[in-house]
Amino acid sequence: MSQIQGLAAHAAGAELLPFRYTPGDLKPLDVEVRISHCGVCHSDLHLISNDWGISQYPFIPGHEIVGTITAIGSGVTTLTVGQRVGIGWQSNSCGQCEWCTQGLENLCPTSESTCVHRHGGYADAVRVNNRFAIPLPDALPSEQAAPLLCGGITVYNPLRSHGINPSSRVGIVGIGGLGHLALQFARVFGAEVTAFSTSAAKEEEARALGAQHFVNTRETKAMREVANTFDFILTTINADQDWMAYIQALRPTGTLCFVGVPPSPVSFHAFPLIAGVRTITGSPIGSPHRLREMVDVAARHGVKAQTESFRMDKANEAIDKVKKNKVRYRAVLAN
């Protein structure tokens, strides 16, 4: 392809405008993918606004990509032209550091992100290292698959890494873009699942997604009643909470895991951690191996993102709706 056409941010917080770039020669280990769908992730909004101080303009956002391979580099042996693949937050890693050689490429110190300092998926095509183009099972529809590639792996990876199983009592904080997927995966792992939400109106939906129990976090009494209950609590929200209430909700040896980033620093008293050997941790995306596993699990067990579809040229409209929390639960752009 001589040029790739997309929608780029040209300044912090600016509206996306049509943009073309020339990708140059295809590298030996890269693949070019014609994009059919791309999810709109909250991370895209942060990058467009340069909230993290790492954006370089102009750039094309987008890192929840589904498409078909149209070209492969001379060194690619495991993928073929015409194959449907998914691409998430990561587009490359060094392949040689202690983390890459353990199959933890998502922890590589020189990891390359799909739309940081390069152009992403709000476009007609993209190029990535072939290891980060994940073949998708036929049973997984492209529109519902796209949000799994960042939102899905963000919640799947910690549930899997912390060994969630039928004996586990799991709490999911927030029933949104991440939380609605976490509820489904926690149920697939056989756990007893409780949804935590500030919105009592989401109870019915949370139960339909896989929660057996529901806690309205605005009710202090309800929070007190679940003290010493959970082996694992996954918090998916980007809001400040009474975090000590969640620590108190953990059983001994329980873990509170952050995948959402609250705006304020998080503070705790040390004593409940010491007395109950409780843990506070976080988790980023997942390796290509874990991505492959996740899409297979999703396909076999019917885990799907709830999506609202927008034409690719309506990306600004989709971004605006996501900003206002008016999408249930993931916006997806379609070419």
Image (tube, rainbow, N blue to C red):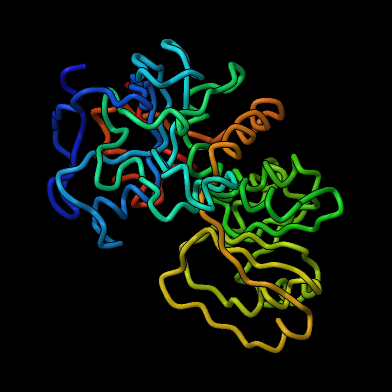
Image x and y of residue 70, in percent: 35, 14
Where is residue 197 shown, x and y percent of the image?
60, 60
Q: To which quarter of the image does residue 121 belong?
A: top left
Residue at x 63%, y 53% (from the top left corner):
158
- Which residue is painted at 15% across and 44% down in the image? 58
> Where, by quadrant of the figure, is residue 136 drawn?
top right
Looking at the image, which is closer to me, 226 or 28?
28
Q: Residue at x 59, y 37 (%)?
A: 289
Q: Is residue 122 above or below residue 164?
A: above
Q: Looking at the picture, tell me which residue is in the foreground, 246 or 122.
A: 122
Residue 38 at x, y = what percent? 38, 31
Report how many numbered discs are placed on residues in the image: 0
Judge left or right: residue 68 versus residue 186.
Answer: left
Which of 197 and 82 lies nearest the eye of the viewer? 82
Most extreme residue toward the top, as rendered? 82
The image shows residue 225, relative to residue 106, as above or below, that is below
Which quadrant: the C terminus?
top left
Q: Quadrant of the N terminus?
A: top left
Query: At 14% across and 37% down in the image, what residue appears?
Result: 17
Residue 179 coordinates in the image, percent (x, y): 58, 50
**For this view, does 27 lie left or right of residue 145?**
left
Q: In the displayed structure, does residue 91 sit left or right of residue 7?
A: right
